Amino acid sequence: MRLRVWFVALLGGIMLSAGWLGNAPGITWARPMLAEDCISYNPATLTIVNEGASGWLLTDGSSRLQMFASQSDAQLGLQVARLYTQQCFIGRGNTRPDRSRYIFVYWKGSSGLSGTLPTNDCIPYERASLSIANEGADGWVLTSSTSRIKMFDTQADAQAGLDLLRNYDRVCYIGRGTSKIMTYLYADVLLVIPVEPLLPVMPVEPVLPPAVAIPPEDCIPYNPASLSIIDQGANGWLLTDGAMAMRLFDTQADAQLGLRVAQAHTQQCFIGRSNARPERSRYIWEYWQGDSGLGIVLPDNDCLSHNPATLSVVDQGASGWLVTDGTSAIKLFDTQGDALLAQSIMAGYDQNCYIGRGNARPDRYAYIMSYLRQSVMLGPPPVMPAGEDCLAYDPFALTLSDQGALGWILTDGTSNMLLLDDLPDAQLAANVAMAHTQQCFVGRGNTRPDRYAYIFEYWKGDSGLGLEPPLDDCLTYNPANLTLADGGANGWFVLDGTHSILLMDTQADADAARQAMLAHTMICYIGRDNTRPDRSRYVHTYLRDTPAPSALPTPVPTPTPMLPPCTSAPPPRMIVNHIGRVTFSTGEPVRVRTGPGTGNPILTLLPEGTIFYVTGGPICGEPYWWWSVQTSTGIIGWMAEGVVGNYFIEPFGP
């Protein structure tokens, strides 16, 4: 296998935008050519059109770029052309009878789109062996040591062809054996040949002109708890908060990743939305900010690293302004002010990440989501509130939300409270949360790479529901024996005698955790058996007291209730004066009605995972058992329990 090494240079007007290098080689000239004869086109509008007996046409809607003899050749030609922005020619001015034989076609200008150049029909050559020879009336031939490559009409055309091919290693073809042949060039090794600078060397520190207008941030706040994705058919998948359309995605998989990013933030921000360029969407940059409080780990599926310390803004003339870190081209902007604002924002991160760059839609940029990520925590830690760091919530408003591969989210409808590995962990977390009214933390301001391993969670406030947090995965400790120990670079330990219970970032964090633990005798865990790469994010803790032996419940057989028959309904399971939950079954919400029967008006709809309080029942109203309930919003009504094989609601709690 030949080693492919790419050295990218921003020379000769070649620019790689949006941080996407792809596999389309740029061109770095070894020596000046004649004035190039090129036609620009929009790669996003390329299509192939069946013209019957004439063949298949590659077009951008305004120019006829290339004819092919077959549809398969046309598809390969489209694959090549979409990687570029210009079709160029040498020799179009010749007037020979067999004029097309003396025209050489090549392609240039990186489109930034993903893809590869096909190499199934290429002729390799050694760059150093290229030469041109006068063949009299037949014209001038460009040859290598092994093959005749191309005929040209004049010596000037042949010399231009020689200068061009010295930057590549292969001439490739589509459609050889037919009368409609497409040519393009391929570089195994793209070398940058040094040239004499035409201008004096500029100082290392760029001097920007004064009074550059930097626009204010353009951000739209949203509620991360209300986010969802909706199938839009041929238009793709829509990310929305229920009030506005936020982002389109090509596939459901892309949309799920986008939902994960959005749930980690509270604002969607843009730079460049006011630009009026023909390729307007290419000059709009999107980023996200504001911590949702859930602490979701941002995906790193498609991220490009940059050095925040070397970011700069480079004038690209009519093409706009480029943000680069000196090694990679990151993003192109319409104005210098837009680029400077983006530079200041990117300086707080070390990765630019993307979702959907592989999409092949005509309006491709509208289906690409971008966001910033830091591989390690940068800058100062967030400022945490003085005293205890606690968030109040309504236990009646708690719901669980299935996030697919991401796991399960516990939310109160306003804040995303916990991220759990699976449904059993999520149910256990909901049981703990229902017994309290405040979720508290120690150590959320730490900046360690494994940040979540150094955050201690505990819960406060009696919900009044008469619930006790479950005894699941718990360790008993003696509050009088709690001490602190310095673990050096590892942080500070909270010890019960010689047994380590917690590891915290600082002595202050360790002491705050010890103070919270003094009021209890047990520390319990949720999710310690998860095997995710970011395992510590899915491990949660809570405190409780060791029950006295006399307080341990004695199993008592549950008597079978004496109820009149309800022949079409499954056996009733709900418990009066207890918590219930809408089951995860069909994806449909459950109706709350004014009375026990389908003929009664609907008061509200409760989505899957919604928690409610059972106040009475059951009453048989064929084909359901009906239960009187109260919702978190204070609505009192009746809910059907389910049908045989599918319970709509279920008991929920310890």
Image (cartoon, rainbow, N blue to C red):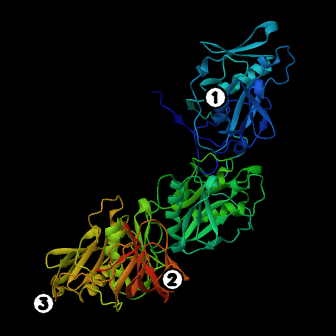
Whichever of callouts 3 and 2 sits on the residue coming sooner in the sequence is 3
For residue 136, above or below residue 92 = above
Name above or below for residue 94 compared with residue 411.
above
Point out the residue furthest to the left here.
549
Quadrant of the rendering where the N terminus is positioned:
top left
Q: In the visual, does 321 lie left or right of 224?
A: right
- Identify the element where label 2 is drawn: strand
Question: Could you tell me which residue is drawn at 40 percent across and 67 percent down?
Answer: 408
Spatial CA distance of label 1 from label 3 is 80 Å
Which residue position is annotated with label 1? 72
Q: Provide residue 60's location: percent of width, then percent of height.
A: 76, 40
Residue lying furthest top in this view? Answer: 136
Res 204 visible: no
Residue at the disc numbered 2: 593
The x and y percentages for residue 269 are 62, 67
Residue type at mark 3 is Ser
Mark positioned earlier in the residue sequence (1 or 3):
1
Q: Of marks 2 and 1, which one's residue comes earlier in the chain?
A: 1
Q: Which residue is mark 3?
A: 550
Q: Which of the two discs, 2 and 1, sits closer to the camera?
A: 2
Q: Quadrant of residue 198?
A: top right
Residue 4 vs 278, above or below: the answer is above
